[in-house]
Image (tube, rainbow, N blue to C red):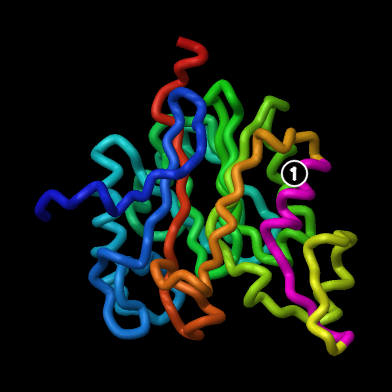
Amino acid sequence: MKKLPTSILQPLDWLLPAGVGAATTLRSPGLSEGKFAGLNLGTHVGDDPQAVEQNRQMLSAALGDRVMPVYINQVHGCNVIEINSDDYRKACLQTAHTNLSSDADVLYTRDQNLALVIQVADCLPILLADKNGREVAAIHAGWRGLAAGIIRHTLEKFESNSLTAWLGPAIGPCHYEVDNAVYDRFTSTTAFKPCGDNVHWMMSLETVAKEQLLEAGLDESDIVATSTCTYCHEDYFSYRREGQTGRFAALIWITSNQASD
């Protein structure tokens, strides 16, 4: 396979701890076609499996030989997979570009060179790192996960209390309409705006996540929010805009434990 441009990985406007890398992908470049045109990384959306595999190979090439992308089966739950034992790490390496068999919506690790991949197309990707660069996590946060405490479950994995967080592109309150059943699952007074019919609301996943991070003890200065709406920006896949579509990724990895060197 020919050398591919590292522009596949989009750098983040986020001051990362030493020894930590993070990036997102966009809709292009990529080899999927039709509804999935571009760099679709999702194996569960109906795309040609060979095209998805080639797209994942492109991502691996952009990461380099040392860093292995780790994928999971995301199910809108709260399960956290901790990847830190030798046996589990070997299992991740053996799966190559396929998903791990476990269903989960969070990946957490203290190991080096494992890129934790979250796939999204309107849900909110959240990346976390401790400020010493020893621990990282990636969260797939839809409204169900946020309502069920997915952020709290993830933070419980961290030994450090000194963390920084990045909230990535997701459907914004300009286009994310939910009903009372969703609204009633939250206590936030700022993440919802009425639609005018008393039964629907415009929801900000980003605002809910930020409030939960602050409640968990993070300082506002430690939270970076992109405030980018996937529905509005065609550089990203958006399920609400397109229906059947692909998935882009947010990913984070430890390159070296510099704080302990």
Q: Is residue 214 magenta?
A: yes
Q: Is residue 194 magenta?
A: no
**Disc 1 secondary structure class:** helix
Residues in magenta, as a range: 198-215
Q: Is residue 187 left or right of residue 118?
A: right
Q: Residue at x 56, y 52 (%)?
A: 226
* Number of numbered discs on residues: 1
Residue in front for this viewpoint, 217 or 66: 217
Residue 9, position in %: x, y?
Answer: 33, 49
Give the quarter of the image for residue 28. bottom left
Q: Residue at x 48, y 42 (%)?
A: 13
Residue 194, visible in the rendered structure: yes
Q: Of the residues shown, which amino acid type is indicated by label 1? A: Leu
Give the quarter of the image for residue 161. top right
Residue 71, position in %: x, y?
Answer: 45, 55
User: Split into 4 quadrants, where in the image is the C terminus?
Assistant: top left
Residue labelled with disc 1: 213
Q: Residue at x 58, y 44 (%)?
A: 166
Residue 107, visible in the rendered structure: no
Residue 26, position in %: x, y?
Answer: 37, 61
Q: Is residue 77 left or right of residue 260?
A: right
Q: Is residue 190 left or right of residue 58?
A: right
User: Split into 4 quadrants, where in the image is the N terminus?
Assistant: bottom left
Q: Residue 198, relative to residue 228: is it above or below?
A: below
Q: Residue 105, relative to residue 19: is it above or below?
A: below
